[in-house]
Amino acid sequence: MQLMDTPENKEKLVDAINLFYNNVMEQKDLRHFFFGMTVDKLVKDIELYQDFVMPKPERYYRESFSQTAPSALQIKAPQFEELQITLQTSLRSGGYLKSQIPVLSAKLLELFEESRAQMADENIKVWKPLEVTNQLVSDLYNANRTDARLEKNGDVYGSRGFYYPFWTRVAGDTKQIIFIGQGFATSVDTPQATMDAFCKQVNDKFTHQKFQVRVSPKGPVLFARHAISYANGVPTRMLMRGAKLFSITFESAMNMDTDKLLKNIIR
């Protein structure tokens, strides 16, 4: 969901954010959430970093959302729940459909929390587009209690510390960071149709992430890919969170393989 893909959609969203901001500032138990923040800053960060909000499973949007800000910035759980209610009420008053509000409010709250975190940062935690390299991504992973190494082709292989190993590729020509997950067949003779049927089961369950089957000399491969534009920079907290969420989803897909069609390297 692109939040400001047309002038009309941007105007509608900015109006709703203004309404939410004013509603929060009127509540003495919530107003500290936006301490030192302006609506202009919030809107700018949405435009810059919305691509880094990873899609979530449908059940996520039916529950109270988790806070994504650093622990030192998190507010009390009842206050965060009230904040969520206030946001959803503001979006409804702003003309959004009931079906749109859960996903939209979750995405906005994550971006608002990143804006707050950036305000509190002593050191800049946003990379400029020209700075982004595979080596930089590898260094970030290794600095965050996960193991990563550069492969011969330049991709970053993330292993221990992630739920399931995967690759990250910085595509400088398209200004994208790409997560790549692969599950390799246990046998070269695994029928394509069997793997296709398993892939359909995975896609039916994990509708937020697209899986497919690719042909290889060593048999069919379960494949997943998620691309993020870094044309406006990289908020490193959101990149780490996105990498971990991609890894969690791929592990969950691999765990559906009760017939052991795939080599699960963490079993």
Image (cartoon, rainbow, N blue to C red):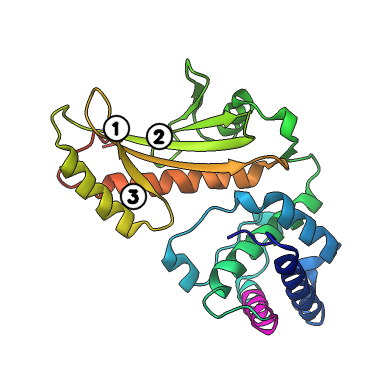
Residue 165 badge: 2
Q: Residues within 10 Å of mark 3 (few under 14, many from 20)?
A: some
Amino acid identity at mark 2: Pro
Report how far apart the C-alphas of labels 3 and 1 lie in the structure: 13 Å
Mark 3 / mark 2, whichever is N-terminal: 2
**Residue 260 seen:** no
Label 2: element kind: loop
Q: What residue type is labelled 1?
A: Ile
Quadrant position of the C terminus in the picture: top left
- The crowding category of the residue bearing disc 2, from other C-alpha atoms within 10 Å (few below 14, some 14 to 19, many at least 20), is many
Whether tag 3 and tag 2 are in contact, CB under 8 A, the answer is: no
Picture residue at 17% right of the left edge, 47% below the top: 258
Task: Say whether residue 248 is left or right of residue 35.
Answer: left
Instruction: Tell me if 258 is positioned left or right of 239 in this view.
Output: left
Read off the magenta span. Answer: 82-94
The answer to whether residue 101 is left or right of residue 112 is left
Q: Do the residues labelled 2 and 1 touch (CB within 8 Å)?
A: yes
Of marks 2 and 1, which one's residue comes earlier in the chain?
2
Q: Distance between the residues labelled 3 and 2?
A: 12 Å
Foreground of the two, 72 or 11: 11
The one nearer the camera, 127 or 1, is: 1
Identify the residue at horizontal 81%, vertical 43% (top origin).
122
Residue 150 percent across, percent down from the top left: 51, 20
Residue 265: which disc? 1
Magenta stretch secondary structure, dominant: helix
**Image height of 172 relative to 39, above or below:** above
